[in-house]
Amino acid sequence: MHRNFTTFIVCAGAALSTSAAPVGDVTTTKMRPLVSESAAQRRALDRANPQGVDHSVARLWNELLLDSIRKDFARPTVHSRNLYHTAAAMWDAWAAYEDQPDQVFHFEKLSAENIQAAREEAISYAMYRLLRHRFVDSPAAPFMFPEYDMLMDELGYDRTYEGTVGDDPASFGNRIAATIITFGLTDGSNEQNAYENQVYLPINPPLLPDFPGNPDIINVDRWQPLALEFFKDQSGNPIPTGYPDFLGPEWGDVTPFSLNENDVQIYQRDGQSWSVWTDPGSPPLFETDTDRYKWGFEMVVLWSSHLDPADGVMIDVSPGGIGNAPLPTVAEESIYYDRTNGGDWGQGWDLNPATGLPYEPQIVPRGDYGRILAEFWADGPDSETPPGHWFAVMNYVADHPLHEKRFMGEGPILDNLEWDVKSYLVMGGGMHDSAVSAWSVKGYYDYLRPISAIRYMADQGQCSDPEMPSYSLEGINLVDGVIEVVTAETTAVGQRHEHLAGEEGKIAIKAWRGPSYIKNEDTDVAGVGWILAENWWPYQRPSFVTPPFAGYVSGHSVFSRGAAELMTLLTGTPFFPGGMGEFEAPMNEFLVFEDGPSIDITLQWATYQDASDQTSLSRIWGGIHPPADDIPGRHMGLKIGREAFTEARRYFNGIKVCPADFQGDGVLNFYDIARYIQSYIEQDQIADINRDSQLDVTDIFDFLDAYNDGCP
């Protein structure tokens, strides 16, 4: 039996439950399926549950946003922006009732007799108006607009009030929404034209994955659309009738959160200018870096051969067996990945820091583990997309009974509302910058996906042995037992390619056999077997195949490493509360487009980085990315996460508008100088005045200039 994918991806509110058995002296919690797709029903269950978590109004609206994203098109760029803009709206409403903090979009300070009530009301009106604007043309609208209405009614607010004049919280919230809506029409996203591409055109004709090979590709270094709809002409030739456009190739033109002139390069290609943020350099190209090009795409084939739970390979997927992997450089990729067996060079953790005890082993079929990762982190159709997924993880951490809401792990415990608005701005800004950076790279380098490269190389033949059939320098390397040439000997009766008789000379691969081997999703498992490489399929549903945008760099790697860094900085620790985050994948229920897993499995992570690394590996097992897309994206995410966190602190501390006001009191004096010097000596990135991600003497001079300029 299978449940809808969305019910397994979220981990907040009623989705959080406490396990029956403690680990040492620490009670663990697990992410569980949502009990209802309706946020209103989940709130009712929370109220009825005496152990339910008391959520802030910001959290309630964030849950509605995540639900809206799940019911919308899979648009990680658009939804990163939505997550950021809504987070900024809530922050601006909260910060208005306090003197020190700076605001992001709407600059207005107010007072109220009941500040908490005023903040909640202003946040609600801002979110109500902004969500209705952003999702008015979305397939989510018929489902979510009534949910927005129900929450406003539950909170006791008049949702028909649209006034913007006056100092009351409702008018103020409406003004915030109006400001952000207006800004969104000028931020480079082309929202007013449904985010349509303005200059990008694909150089390659589309690939028809339902048909063998990749005969029409023109440039094997550039992205190729996929056409899932087609008709056949009178000669039986398939003609594509439509295919999705590249999503967001010009997203580098969108106004970021923390990225600045130090982070961007302007390049020319195809007669157009391309803004490229945190540029990682070129991916391996077929003509100039052939060996690395082939090595990476061939590894995708090798890992596809792992996706069979019946192959007898068992691995320990507890934090004691995996994780704790230092971030490699690109030059180390050949030793970082276990090319043959899957995984990376991580050795796991000796002890759980919360219990002082070893992690309990969890021995599971590798085929189940790889399939679960590919689906859990896929964030394709019907999910909250990768940036929203990390909001869900952050909400799960916030609800954990062992989590203390201390900013950066220090100081007083914040109330739920302050924690939520600050953490949402941190994560929202970081995820938006991750999307701007990743998609600027995708748009400019325009790199192809594994399905295009693997099928193309297989069409050319093999490049390993000139004495064997089908030799071509442009072909694929042979790997005994995984990538082979079909011959008369191998198709003989009783031999491994017997079922491929008549296909002699073609390339066969031992890989996940694809959706054509699944007739009933509730009972069938495609398994791994010998198939023609020209028919290779990623581990994806047949209606999706691969995301409609370029591969390099992996958005998942950028988002996830950025989010992991943000979570580490936000909480003051790299570890999940209790030393372990968990997600349950029930036997024969979790997987969507084939049956499985074959046993109950719990995904476990000691640290946020471990979860991030797992995300990146999942994209190789899923057939979506080669290694070349991964490691550069992780380095981008690490840098972006740190920059975004520091930028959020500038708003929190009130030094965005007046960079020298390190006391945050609007007055510049000796105490600001002393505090800046202390921050500089401690190598606190808040002292990076020129925002170039390094502390040096130029920051001191820039601070002195800002001090002399005074506050506005």
Image (cartoon, helix red, strand yellow):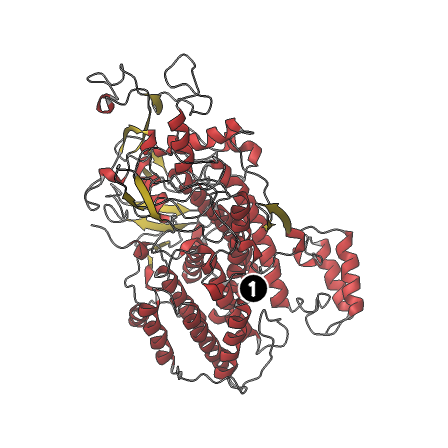
Q: Secondary structure at mark 1?
A: loop
Quadrant of the image occupied by residue 281: top right
Quadrant of the image occupied by residue 679: bottom right
Please tell me whether residue 168 is drawn above or below residue 149 in the rendered image. below
Please tell me which residue lies in front, 405 or 706.
706
Please tell me whether residue 329 is drawn above or below residue 590 in the rendered image. above
Residue located at (32% from left, 56% from top):
6
Residue 129 percent location from the top left of the image: 44, 75
Question: How many residues crowd mark 1 within 10 Å: few (<14), some (14–19), many (20+)?
Answer: few
Please tell me which residue lies in front, 543 or 672.
543
Residue 118 percent location from the top left of the image: 50, 81
Q: Quadrant of the C terminus?
A: bottom right
Residue located at (28% from left, 64% from top):
36
Under mark 1, the amino acid is Asp
Residue 509 percent location from the top left of the image: 33, 27
Asked if one can make out residue 108 in the rendered structure from this viewpoint, the answer is: yes
Please tell me which residue lies in front, 214 or 646.
214
Please tell me whether residue 66 is drawn above or below residue 583 in the rendered image. below
Residue 187 percent location from the top left of the image: 56, 64
Circle 1 sits on which residue?
187
